[in-house]
Amino acid sequence: MKCAVSWEDSKRNEAAALSQRLSLPLVELSDTCDGLLLVVGLENYYLKNTGKNDLGPLCVDFFSSRMKHRLKSGGGPLLKAVGPVKNDQRRVLDVTAGLGRDAYVLASQGFEVTLLERSSILFEMLNQEIGKQFLDDLQEADRASLSKMKLIHIDAVDFMRSTEEKFDVVCLDPMFPERSKSAKVKKDLQYLQLLHGVEDDGSALLPLARNIAIKKVVVKRPIHAPPLAGLVPNHSFKAKTLRLDVYLPP
């Protein structure tokens, strides 16, 4: 899908540098165009769909009220599936970083999280948010969480096939889970589909993830979806709308 870079107020120079890095056109925010705009806002980079189907803006925001509520509630089933932090078991690989929310939850609990993202646009959005750790007015606890996140711009399959590293836990959230035809796709997922295009169901990632996991692989699935790649998990943790399947290494 067509994409361009724009800016708010005094952010033109930053937007110009961003457009050069991404090899995307730089346009005024008021310009009429059809496609996606990556806007350099005053506080966050955000995506804006300028087509007929206006989805509303989407940004990477680890400090939103939604995230604060999630952290206060204990992180939900994700932390149950990943398990507690231990000194010798704290390295996590987030294969499908997306908007980085799961990674930030884990980092806030003390895990060292490596995030993989192949979309250059999502990479820039994530990198801008993680870079807030260097702001003077950031709370120390938030700075500590961001410092535990390492972002890599790479295709997950390429990384897992070539890496010699091992991770205690590998987390996988396939972008296109099966769903009923009547279900409305969330705004987040619609934007991810626009950025990534048509993909498979993520089945190829599971065996690669198991090969580099020391303790377990955690796969996020819709509550009624079949197991990824047809492989029955060793354990499952269920919430209202999702299920976390746990696979042990082969």
Image (cartoon, grey):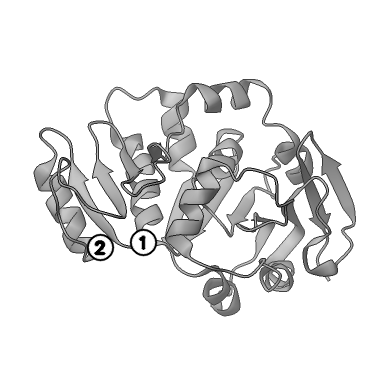
Report helix, strand or loop for mark 2: helix
Q: Is residue 183 above or below residue 226?
A: above
Say which amino acid is labelled 2: Leu
- State the quadrant of the C terminus: bottom right
Label 2–label 1 contact, CB within 8 A: yes
Q: Residue at x 59, y 69 (%)?
A: 165
- Residue 26 is marked as none
Q: Is residue 243 above or below residue 135?
A: below
Residue 32: horizontal and vertical position, in percent?
Answer: 18, 48
Q: Residue at x 71, y 42 (%)?
A: 86
Residue 30: horizontal and vertical position, in percent?
Answer: 15, 40
Q: Quadrant of residue 136?
A: top left
Classify residue 231 as left or right of residue 186. Answer: right
Q: Is residue 27 above or below residue 184?
A: below
Which residue is disc 2 drawn over?
A: 22
Q: Residue at x 22, y 52 (%)?
A: 33
Binning the other alpha carbons within 10 Å of mark 1 as few (below 14), some (14 to 19) or many (20 upward) gives some
Classify residue 208 as left or right of residue 194. Answer: right
The residue closer to the viewer here, 84 or 180, is 180
Which residue is disc 1 drawn over?
A: 120
Say which amino acid is labelled 1: Ser
Binning the other alpha carbons within 10 Å of mark 2 as few (below 14), some (14 to 19) or many (20 upward) gives some
- State the quadrant of the N terminus: bottom left
Classify residue 100 as left or right of residue 84. Answer: left
